[in-house]
């Protein structure tokens, strides 16, 4: 039998051992998106209405390509973390594990596909 005070039982990372890290990951990605989304809107807006060759030339420049790739990568990571939180709250049992795996595969796959498309345009 362990003689622990209430404070000693409460110190640590919580029952799931990852809540604080998940919280900070969401906060950091949301602040990154706060900067990246306006940059993406302005860089993407400048390319609207151009021909195919003009768009390829525009995204061959490093700044628009990097902003678009970062926005996609950070956006899908933030999406994955948010969906995982929602699934953990509302889905239970084996369906929870399967849902988290499926959504992680979908979000990382979509991010990889988007970054690949930007790299193809940039090169």
Image (cartoon, rainbow, N blue to C red):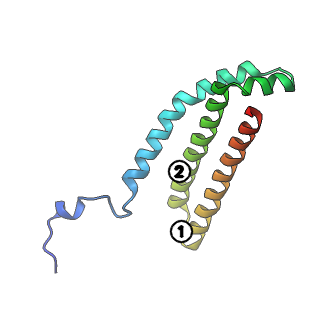
Residue 78 spot, x, y in % from top left: 55, 44
Question: Which quadrant would the C terminus be assigned to in this image?
Answer: top right
* Relative to 116, residue 9 above or below: below
Of residue 72 and residue 87, the one placed in the foreground of this image is 72
Question: Which quadrant would the N terminus be assigned to in this image?
Answer: bottom left
Q: Secondary structure at mark 1?
A: loop
The circle drawn on residue 37 is none
Residue 50, located in which quarter of the rendered image? top right
Label 1–label 2 contact, CB within 8 A: no
The circle drawn on residue 81 is 2
Of residue 106 and residue 114, the one placed in the foreground of this image is 114
Residue 94 spot, x, y in % from top left: 57, 73
Q: Residue furthest bottom?
A: 1
The residues tagged by marks 1 and 2 sit, at their Cα atoms, a distance apart of 17 Å
Residue at figure coordinates x 61%, y 35% from the top left: 71
Give the side of residue 4 with respect to residue 36, left or right: left
Q: Secondary structure at mark 2?
A: helix
First in sequence, mark 1 or 2: give its number. 2
Crowd tier of the residue under label 2, counting other residues whose Cα lies within 10 Å: few below 14, some 14–19, many 20 or above? many
Q: Select label 1 or label 2 by which is in front.
A: 2
Residue 70 spot, x, y in % from top left: 59, 36
Residue at figure coordinates x 54%, y 49% from the top left: 82
The circle drawn on residue 92 is 1
Q: Residue furthest front?
A: 123
Residue 57, located in which quarter of the rendered image? top right
Residue at figure coordinates x 17%, y 60% from the top left: 7
Of residue 43 and residue 60, the one placed in the foreground of this image is 60
Number of callouts: 2
Residue at figure coordinates x 68%, y 53% from the top left: 109
Of residue 59 and residue 3, the one placed in the foreground of this image is 59
* Relative to 25, residue 93 above or below: below
């Amino acid at each position: 039998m362990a003689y622990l005070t209430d404070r000693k039982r409460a110190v640590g990372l919580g029952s799931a051992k990852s809540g604080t890290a998940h919280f900070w990951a969401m906060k950091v990605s949301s602040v990154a998106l706060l900067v990246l989304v306006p940059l993406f809107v302005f860089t993407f807006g400048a390319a609207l209405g151009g021909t195919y060759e003009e768009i390829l030339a525009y995204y061959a420049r490093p700044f628009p390509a990097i902003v678009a790739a970062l926005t996609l990568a950070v956006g899908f990571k933030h999406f994955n973390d948010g969906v995982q939180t929602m699934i953990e709250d509302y889905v239970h049992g084996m369906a929870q594990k399967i849902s988290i795996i499926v959504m992680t595969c979908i979000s990382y796959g979509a991010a990889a596909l988007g970054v690949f498309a930007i790299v193809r345009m940039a090169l």
